[in-house]
Amino acid sequence: MAGITFQGVGKTYAGNVNAVREVTLEVADGEFIVLVGPSGCGKSTLLRMVAGLEEITTGQISIDGRVVNRLDPADRDIAMVFQNYALYPHMSVRENMAYGLRNRRTPRDEIARRVDDAARMLELGPYLDRKPRALSGGQRQRVAMGRAIVRQPAAFLFDEPLSNLDAKLRVAMRGEIRRLQRRLGTTALYVTHDQLEAMTLADRLVVLNGGRVEQIGAPLELYHHP
Ligand code: ADP
Ligand code: ADP
């Protein structure tokens, strides 16, 4: 089954902090899911378990039908976009975008083709030889998107990717992320605390509270108060 499946997923940190409890959820192939809820409700932890950055304490997570509990982050078919972009300062835009593929022994010409395609989609062509410090915040965010796109993963994981941008750029970039995700058809899990961003992006919203799923539904179902 394509998409992402959570079966009774839980996370207990040292000190008996139950950050995520009994989360069961089927994310359809190509679906855009936004995780929302108060600070500390477990959004980041859930995302990081999918990414392999946190161990899964209980239950099972599958990506495209493959159980990932015991797989290294590099062996999971995902790409993550972080709030701070996590770009390598000493590498050019091109090198930053290619880096994850080089590690995976993708052939050189295939890497070049994918980087050029992504640069075109993101209008980064003129900046490919610059270092991140010579880019604006919005451009850095695009490079982070480009690095995710070139991997051609089964899923994108977004951890508050726009929260370091000013309000105007945030609106522009969220439209861009949605457009790219639709065009590529890649399943997306997106964490934000911005309600408008959540409503604009989501096919379905997942509201977490105290580590549990409190509500799931399309934005209008959840926010329509008759
Ligand atoms: P959110 O992303 O919704 O703000 P988090 O997933 O970051 O929530 O955190 C969920 C809960 O787990 C919080 O109580 C937080 O303090 C706790 N937590 C997160 N990371 C760790 C950690 N590495 N060690 C211990 N507790 C953690
Ligand atoms: P967010 O809620 O956006 O994840 P935080 O500042 O809460 O941002 O967490 C930043 C990092 O610190 C995360 O990697 C998270 O796992 C970790 N963290 C959060 N809470 C705790 C905690 N109580 N103990 C140890 N690490 C924590």
Image: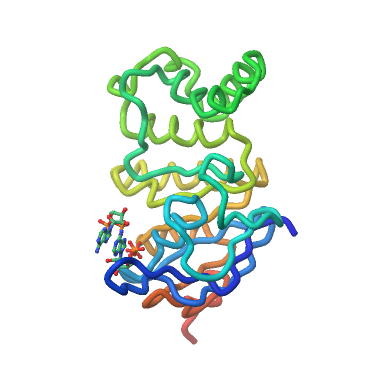
Q: What's the residue at 49%, 50% (across, down)?
A: 51
Q: Is residue 199 visible?
A: no
State left or right for residue 156 relative to residue 40. right
- 206 relative to 95, above or below: below
Q: Is residue 7 visible?
A: yes
- Name the residue furthest bottom: 226
Q: How is the image coloured?
A: rainbow
Q: What's the residue at 38%, 29% (across, down)?
A: 139
Q: What's the residue at 47%, 18% (across, down)?
A: 94
Horizontal and vertical percent position of residue 161: 39, 46
Image mark count: 0
Quadrant position of the N terminus in the picture: bottom right
**Pick the front one: 1 or 81:** 1
Quadrant of the rendered structure where residue 132 is?
A: top left
State left or right for residue 213 relative to residue 170. right
- 64 relative to 203, above or below: above
- 197 relative to 156, above or below: below
Horizontal and vertical percent position of residue 151: 59, 34
**Pick the front one: 136 or 145:** 145
Horizontal and vertical percent position of residue 206: 50, 70
Q: Quadrant of ligand 2?
A: bottom left
Q: What's the residue at 31%, 72% (across, down)?
A: 17
Horizontal and vertical percent position of residue 10: 47, 71
